[in-house]
Image: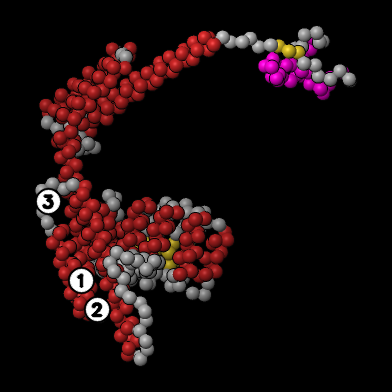
Amino acid sequence: QVQGAEQQPLECSVSIGTHGQLQVAPAEQGSPKGTGPKCIPLPLPVVPGDRVTHWHATEGRLRAIDANVVLIANTRNAIESMVYDVRPYTDAAEAANHSLYQHLTSTERDTLRAALDKAELWLYEDGEEADLPAVQAQLADMEGLYEKIVGPHEQRLRREQLAQDLQVIRRGTQEGIDGLRQWLAGPDGAALPVGDLDQAVQFLDGVQAKITQARTEVTDGDLAEARKLQDQVSEYAGTLHYKKVVTQSKEEAQENGEPAGPALPLPAGESNGSASPPPVVTDFAAHYTNLCQQRKIKCNSGVVKMLQNTAPTSIDLLHNFVGPKGALAVVDTVRVMPSVTELNLSGNSLDNEDIKSIVHNLEAHPNLTSIDLSDNPISVIAGQMLIKFVTSNTRLKCMNLEGTLLMKTQKESIGKLLEGR
């Protein structure tokens, strides 16, 4: 309320003048005609520099106190988390959920249990008012005891897990080698030039020797090398398939008196822009099981039963939910199953990234004519990929997209592409 005005609130504007004074002006709207705004200078006091310095120092001290409080709280939380995370290792009732319980001796479990009880009691008694060094020392003691008692067991379990993972990868590589040897021994291998056939045998023998080497202790590097060998076998299978096609094309051209095409065999590891031909697989159930083991997902017994058929024409997951990771394992298996004509992936929580993998793995499938993607949360991005997929894959006759998030125009475009096929 401006001094000297009538005793009722006035609408005013406040600004800082050019010399630092506070100016209060009544709003022009509603002012008496001809009076205009009136500025009332209210000079601000000058704050001495030493006071500003004092305030800055005080703020710095308060910030340091706040940071210390946060560190103490975080350290206490770390102790509390450790108590609750480690306690199941000492509890017989939790033995089924924590394999470490079985590996610890009774003396080790008793020592851990006593330390956990002591730490928990300290947290809610002496630790309530403890400063940062005391809290950090308590956490260091807990971590040191954990490393001394549990650490060696964890390291041993880690080594065992690495060894198991290596065996799974090697089994997958062996499956690829066996399938490729069978392919080479058949009419496809006979179509290859003798030099390529001999080179393939030498390559497979070399990989075979590497995957059968014994390992006293498996490392992460060994797993990386094993995966690399598995990929090389898969890529080499694609290269041989391509060479066979090129050789047969040249032979047919010569028989017909036509000039041979310019195509040259692709070296292993290179790509012509499309998906590599799939490896030769005869045991589809074993192939699926191996994929699940590699990806650390649970095999679905219903899927295994379907895949035990030597030449299934339909794979249906409509009433057999496997989830997105499980569905991709099935798709990777269908990739090596030329007999499949129908694939139902309805209602398996597939997303746009999953569609990208599905399109890549099935774009070269020789006989797939129907795929059901209904009731999956796929959207516009997936729609764009599926339009390209349907356009390039002229064998497809049916694609169910009901219950998806594709645009109406995308569904219509896919429908038009499939019409008349």
Marker disc for residue 215:
3
For the residue labelled by badge 3, is the local secondary structure a helix, a strand or a loop? Answer: loop
Q: Does the CB distance between marks 2 and 1 fall below 8 Å?
A: yes
Name the spot of residue 221 as percent of width and height, x first: 21, 49
Task: Please report the residue visible at 54 percent of the width from the left and 11 percent of the height from the top.
Answer: 49
Residue 200 numbered tag: 1
Whether residue 31 is in magenta: the answer is yes
Magenta highlight range = 7-32
Residue in the image at 29% along x and 80% along y = 247
* CA gap, disc 2 and disc 1: 10 Å
User: Does the magenta run of residues contain 399?
Assistant: no
Q: Position of residue 187 (x, y in %)?
A: 24, 79
Q: Label 3 crowding class (10 Å Cα cut-off): few <14, some 14-19, many 20+?
A: few
Is residue 104 rendered to the left or right of residue 391?
left
Q: Is tag 2's residue or tag 3's residue first in the polypeptide sequence?
A: 2
Residue appearing at x 71%, y 11% in the figure: 42
Q: Nearer the viewer, residue 188 or 348?
A: 188
Locate the N terminus and report the quarter of the image it occupies. top right
Q: Earlier in the sequence, mark 2 or mark 1?
A: 2
Q: In which image quadrant can residue 305 be found?
A: bottom left
Q: Is residue 360 visible?
A: yes
